[in-house]
Image (cartoon, rainbow, N blue to C red):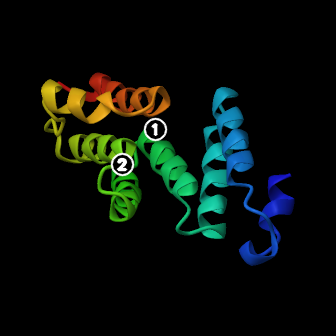
Amino acid sequence: MADLYFSRSASDSPDLSEDVRALVEEAERQGKDDLALEYAEKLLRHHPDGPIGIRLTARLHLRSGNAHRALAQCQALLRHDRQDAVAIAGANVALTLIEGTIHWPSLETLTAALRSRDAAIRAESLTLYESTIAHLE
């Protein structure tokens, strides 16, 4: 399905970003991170400004240890929405991995930022922070 979607130009096809996201997440669940990243990057090329593709690519780059690329994707998201909690978390995690020093907000700031967000956004943000704990010394 994804290959058929990507074979058309973005202007000639409906936005199937959510469907591609489901394929990426299924590939991740199956441990096929390379395939997940391939689909996320294709989605990003198909819709360069689409937040779904940017967010997926950033997350997968963080997971694979490519913090510089993840940071670039998070910065792109923040140019569109300075209050994007997931992009802020991703950028903080990427900077932590790049510089080796913690770039996390205080617990008070984090709580205030996430309090008004829906449960999925809170969970995704906290999962990003949690993912770096094993890398900290």
Q: Is residue 2 left or right of residue 85?
A: right
Residue 63: which disc?
A: 1
Disc 2 vs disc 1: which is toward the camera?
A: 2
Q: Is residue 12 left or right of residue 42?
A: right
Residue 84: which disc?
A: 2
Q: Secondary structure at mark 2?
A: loop
Query: Relative to 76, does residue 30 appear above or below in the rendering?
Result: above
Q: CA distance from mark 2 to mark 1?
A: 19 Å
Residue sitting at x 81%, y 61%: 5
Q: Is residue 94 left or right of residue 59?
A: left
Residue 92: which disc?
A: none
Question: Can you give x and y, in whole percent of width and height, for residue 72 in the image?
Answer: 36, 60
Question: Can you give x and y, in whole percent of width and height, for residue 4 in the image?
Answer: 86, 61
Residue sitting at x 36%, y 27%: 126
Counting residues from the N terminus, which is met first, the one under dot 2 or under dot 1?
Answer: 1
Question: Can you give x and y, in whole percent of width and height, for residue 121 in the image?
Answer: 44, 34
Query: Which amino acid type is marked by label 2?
Result: Asp
